[in-house]
Image (cartoon, rainbow, N blue to C red):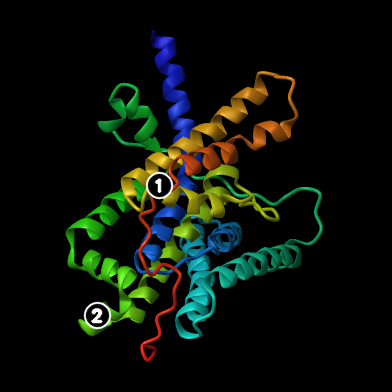
């Protein structure tokens, strides 16, 4: 029995670590979507956070500086998206996709510019786990949830704060109003564009932290396209979690479990191509997404620019 509990705890801990970058990014996406901003460019935001977080940590020798820089890197791409979609009123889907390609090219170029052609990737020390004295002693769940790195504790705090903001505060009502009917919100004196800019900043912060998690907590290095589609999966996680912070974490852990399972299956030596294992998390995401079809919780004006003078 003790051995079984250890296996369960190990899988849960691995699922949580794989889910953390998805959850951080998805929280930012959920916040932006509440205000009506559809950001397909989450992949670019995460990639920017991963790159600038790693570069800052590498040259400063401080993981704290890397975390802050990762958040700022995410804000950089998110605010470009915000300007194009809110001020210029461009198509939000096209802008997001364009920013993904732009960020991929930019980070690859800058990485090559800084480090040149190397056979060995430059690396930094990864974030160490912090064990919480009392909570970590809880059987099974303690070692899983309360012996983690600082970014996962930030994730826990963010889930609580976002839940309160979304469902218990006036600001949450404002977000919902701006996303559901911006013209009515504007008529009521709410600053539609200001609210959307703030939501984009928050999206950038958490998307950047999700990217920084990959380079500073999971891998300890940066390489081209290191995010590998996680930004798109974060968008799926938001849909599965129905914009609810708690459900977002649970949905991300489901995907994280699939990622952990693929690693375990590969080590067991099952005679299947490696690509079959790699597609498992994406396959699970698609299946669950199909099962949730028709149950959208997206705001009515998601992805639609607000034009004040247009009737």
Residue 279 appearing in the image:
yes
Residue 128 appearing in the image:
no
Label 2's element? Answer: loop
Kindly indicate the quadrant of the structure image that contains residue 54.
Answer: bottom right
Q: Which residue lies furthest to the bottom in this view?
A: 309
The answer to whether 1 is drawn above or below residue 260 in the figure is above
The answer to whether 237 is drawn above or below residue 188 in the figure is above
* Quarter the N terminus occupies: top left
Query: Which residue corresponds to mark 1?
Result: 150
Kindly indicate the quadrant of the structure image that contains residue 117.
Answer: bottom right
Q: Residue at the spot x=52%, y=80% of the render?
A: 84
Numbered mark located on residue 190 in the image: 2
**Residue 207 or residue 42, whichever sits in front:** 42
**Residue 262 or residue 141, whichever sits in front:** 262
Horizontally, residue 166 falls left or right of residue 218, namely: left
| Separation of marks 2 and 1 at Cα, in angstroms | 36 Å
Q: Position of residue 138 (x, y in %)?
A: 28, 25
Horizontally, residue 273 falls left or right of residue 11, namely: right
**Residue 93 or residue 136, whichever sits in front:** 93
Q: Position of residue 300 (x, y in %)?
A: 36, 66
Q: Residue at the spot x=72%, y=32% of the render?
A: 274
**Disc 2: CA contacts within 10 A as few (<14), some (14-19) or many (>=20):** some
């Amino acid at each position: 029995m003790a051995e079984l509990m250890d296996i369960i705890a190990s899988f849960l801990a691995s699922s949580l670590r794989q889910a953390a970058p998805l959850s951080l990014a998805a929280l930012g996406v959920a916040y932006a979507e509440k205000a009506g901003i559809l950001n397909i460019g989450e992949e670019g935001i995460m990639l920017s956070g991963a790159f600038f977080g790693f570069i800052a940590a590498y040259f400063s020798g401080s993981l704290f500086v890397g975390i802050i820089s990762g958040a700022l890197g995410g804000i950089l791409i998110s605010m470009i998206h915000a300007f194009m979609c809110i001020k210029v009123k461009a198509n939000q889907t096209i802008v997001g996709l364009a920013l993904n390609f732009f960020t991929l090219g930019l980070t690859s170029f800058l990485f090559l510019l800084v480090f040149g052609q190397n056979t060995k990737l430059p690396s930094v020390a990864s974030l160490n786990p912090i064990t919480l004295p009392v909570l970590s002693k809880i059987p099974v769940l303690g070692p899983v949830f309360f012996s983690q790195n600082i970014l996962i504790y930030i994730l826990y705090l963010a889930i609580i704060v976002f839940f309160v903001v979304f469902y218990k505060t006036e600001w949450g009502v404002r977000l919902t109003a701006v996303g559901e009917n911006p013209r009515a919100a504007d008529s009521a004196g709410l600053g539609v564009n200001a609210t959307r800019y703030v939501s984009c900043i928050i999206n950038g912060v958490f998307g950047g932290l999700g990217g920084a998690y990959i380079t500073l907590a999971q891998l300890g290095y940066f390489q081209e396209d290191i995010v590998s589609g996680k930004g798109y999966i974060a968008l799926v996680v938001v849909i599965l979690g129905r914009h609810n912070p708690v459900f977002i974490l649970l949905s991300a852990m489901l995907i994280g479990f699939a990622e952990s399972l693929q690693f375990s299956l590969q080590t067991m030596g099952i005679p299947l191509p490696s690509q079959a294992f790699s597609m498992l998390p994406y396959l699970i995401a698609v299946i669950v997404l199909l099962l949730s079809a028709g149950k959208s919780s997206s705001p009515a004006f998601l992805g639609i620019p607000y034009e004040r003078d247009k009737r």
